[in-house]
Image (spheres, rainbow, N blue to C red):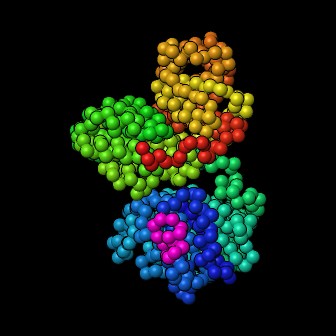
């Protein structure tokens, strides 16, 4: 979710780049920088922190030039720092690069380049691209780009400057957004429309494996083989605010729609040959696990609900007892944690105060700690012994969506890694899980493409006063998250209950017309769940059931059935939660609520 902007024309590039980066601040970032090509030299200014820090640096230096590239960075490889900020120069200063995405094979490429005599200043995957471009450069930067794209794996949106080719910017894309803006005697690149909307409303959208050669008066598009690509010009008719949201009405719905790519990114490079799990900075060995007899998962809010799913999956696959605790309770109850305990803390921001305190408490008692977080260099990532990052990109809306689904993916990967090392899972099961995990983005996209059913239902029921969510096993874990989403953005009273507990009090609250959301996706618990659904229906409840496609037994029992695609039972939470997110969103929209900024709530709870 980094921000890229580039300019070539007759005007001074620096103010245009800084203005464009400002328009991309909503994407989230931890550092920023620009590169200006002038008189045969590339001048770079970059810094950790807010754009004001960069602007102060630029003001102290006369950065003249009519061609340049800029970047706001959301850290992936290497913590936020001045050195790790973009743009990155190649070793000799010949080439400057900005990059959005993840280069999966950057480590072997970096090793090879080191052997070839190249040196590196940063920890980033992007500097590898810069040096690789220099290695292949023979006077034609476009040819060098083509050769580099043939060698790198992963996702990228690239903007490239070469001081020996001062009349062009070269851009390329694969699985990361990049556009080309067309002006009058000037042209632009950007990762998103708001960066250039002040200057032009005419844009081309780059597709995967395409290269753009941007000059002052013309733009050329080619594929990786050098063949010409014909593209259609798009006229932007959104206003600036809508453009920041990609045309969506709210950031929350935009982020719900970003989940297929976020899941794909979080899986990227972590499943090898459908049989091996690679967890970056998690270095727990088989021998380490032999000393572990208990796992704690500690988190708050939505992350806690992800942890409940994690408990089910880790216990089922790795056969280690798991306890899930709310961080604000964990730190005050003198938990039974010692050197034989593994603690997993989950925090989207990595700055949740109670979670940080719980992490420190666990470490003080001798526990090894794994942090699952979305922010490189955050407090939990620095304090933990091991870190697994979710590549969800920044979340702007207060109500978490894509952070939750990527936390689930991270927990699945942890569970599988532990199970493989402990020998509690068969190779067949590993391959089955890997195969189905890789299908999840497509299945989530299917749910998003068919959201009208949820939208219509929300329109008909947004005046509900009370809503109850029920489920068993993994469905109960997802019910808690669905209920939280509804209450936090629509202000409708909502509660989640284990379906088996209905007779222990909850049924007393069900009366004629009470809206009840019943999750029934677990095959081994379906008959029990069906019985609970009938109990609610007998008391007059209005039942909406969520079930797997092909399961038609509920259609004669409930008022409405919403189907999710078939998948393994362990993975159903990723699919079940998507229509629940949509339901909460559309209910809140119909009520006229401030969806992105619900009352009394903040995105990150950084105080106790």
Furthest toward the top, the residue is: 538
Viewed as shown, does residue 131 lie left or right of 162? left
Look at the image and tell me whether residue 159 can be seen: yes
Depth order, front residue of 576/376? 376
Furthest toward the bottom, the residue is: 39
* Spot occupied by residue 463 in the image (x, y as percentages of width and height): 70, 29
Residue 176, by quadrant, is bottom right
Viewed as shown, does residue 367 lie left or right of 162? left
54 vs 507: above or below: below
Q: Is residue 46 magenta-colored?
A: yes
82 vs 349: above or below: below
Residue 293, by quadrant, is top left
* Spot occupied by residue 299 in the image (x, y as percentages of width and height): 41, 40
Q: Residue at x 66, y 71 (%)?
A: 188
Q: In which quarter of the image is the C terminus?
A: top left
Viewed as shown, does residue 109 lie left or right of 256? left
Q: Which residue is drawn at 54% across and 73% down?
A: 55
Q: Is residue 28 magenta-colored?
A: no
Q: Residue at x 62, y 64 (%)?
A: 23
* Spot occupied by residue 303 in the image (x, y as percentages of width and height): 46, 40
Viewed as shown, does residue 413 lie left or right of 27? left
* Spot occupied by residue 515 in the image (x, y as percentages of width and height): 64, 23
Q: In which quarter of the image is the N terminus?
A: bottom right
Depth order, front residue of 335/134? 335
The magenta stretch is: 45-57
Look at the image and tell me whether residue 260 can be seen: no
Q: Which residue is drawn at 33% across and 52% down?
A: 383
């Amino acid at each position: 979710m980094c921000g890229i902007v580039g300019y070539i024309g007759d005007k001074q590039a620096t103010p245009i780049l800084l203005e464009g980066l400002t328009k991309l601040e909503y994407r989230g970032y931890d550092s920023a920088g620009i590169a200006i090509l002038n008189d045969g030299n590339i001048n770079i200014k970059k810094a950790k922190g807010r754009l004001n820090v960069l602007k102060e640096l630029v003001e102290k230096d006369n950065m003249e030039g009519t061609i340049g590239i800029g970047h706001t960075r959301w850290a992936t490889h290497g913590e936020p720092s001045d050195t790790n900020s973009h743009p990155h120069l190649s070793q000799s200063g010949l080439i400057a690069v900005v990059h959005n995405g993840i280069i999966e094979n950057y480590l072997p490429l970096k090793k090879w380049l080191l052997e070839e005599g190249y040196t590196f200043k940063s920890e980033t995957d992007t500097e590898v691209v810069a040096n690789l471009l220099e290695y292949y450069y023979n006077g034609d930067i476009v040819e060098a780009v083509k050769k580099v794209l043939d060698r790198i794996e992963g996702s990228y949106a690239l903007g490239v400057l070469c001081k020996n080719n001062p009349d062009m910017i070269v851009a390329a894309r694969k699985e990361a957004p990049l556009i080309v803006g067309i002006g009058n005697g000037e042209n632009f690149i950007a990762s998103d429309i708001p960066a250039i909307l002040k200057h032009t409303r005419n844009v081309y959208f780059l597709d995967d494996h395409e290269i753009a050669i941007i000059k002052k008066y013309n733009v050329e598009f080619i594929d990786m083989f050098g063949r010409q690509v014909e593209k259609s010009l798009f006229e932007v008719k959104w206003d600036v605010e809508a453009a920041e949201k990609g045309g969506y009405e709210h950031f929350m719905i935009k982020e719900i729609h970003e989940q297929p790519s976020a899941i794909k990114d979080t899986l990227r490079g972590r499943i090898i040959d459908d049989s091996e799990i690679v967890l970056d900075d998690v270095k727990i060995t088989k021998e380490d696990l032999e000393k572990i007899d208990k796992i704690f998962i500690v988190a708050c809010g939505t992350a806690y609900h992800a942890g409940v799913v994690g408990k089910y999956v880790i216990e089922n696959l790795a056969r280690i007892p798991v306890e899930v605790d709310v961080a604000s309770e964990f730190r005050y109850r003198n938990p039974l944690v010692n050197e034989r305990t593994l603690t997993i803390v989950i925090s989207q921001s990595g700055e949740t105060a109670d979670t940080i305190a719980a992490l420190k408490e666990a470490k003080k008692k001798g526990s090894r700690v794994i942090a699952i977080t979305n922010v490189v260099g955050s407090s939990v990532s620095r304090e933990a012994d091991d870190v697994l990052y979710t590549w969800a990109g920044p979340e702007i809306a207060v109500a978490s969506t894509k952070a939750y689904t990527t936390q689930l993916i991270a927990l699945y990967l942890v569970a599988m890694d532990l199970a493989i090392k402990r020998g509690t899972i068969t190779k067949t099961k590993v391959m089955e899980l890997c195969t189905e995990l890789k299908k999840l983005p497509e299945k989530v996209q299917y749910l998003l493409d068919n959201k009208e059913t949820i939208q219509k239902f929300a329109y008909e029921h947004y005046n509900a006063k009370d809503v109850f969510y029920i489920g068993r096993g993994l469905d109960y874990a997802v019910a808690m998250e669905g209920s939280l989403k509804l209450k936090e953005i629509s202000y409708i009273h909502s509660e989640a209950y284990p379906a088996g507990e209905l007779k222990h009090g909850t049924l007393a609250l069900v009366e004629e017309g009470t809206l009840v959301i019943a999750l029934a996706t677990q095959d081994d618990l379906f008959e029990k769940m069906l019985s609970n659904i009938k109990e609610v229906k007998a008391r007059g409840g209005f039942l909406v059931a969520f079930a797997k496609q092909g399961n038609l037994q509920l259609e004669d029992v409930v008022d409405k059935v919403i189907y999710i695609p078939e998948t393994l039972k362990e993975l159903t939470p990723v699919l079940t939660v998507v229509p629940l997110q949509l339901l909460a969103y559309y209910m809140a929209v119909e009520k006229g609520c401030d969806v992105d900024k619900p009352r009394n709530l903040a995105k990150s709870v950084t105080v106790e």
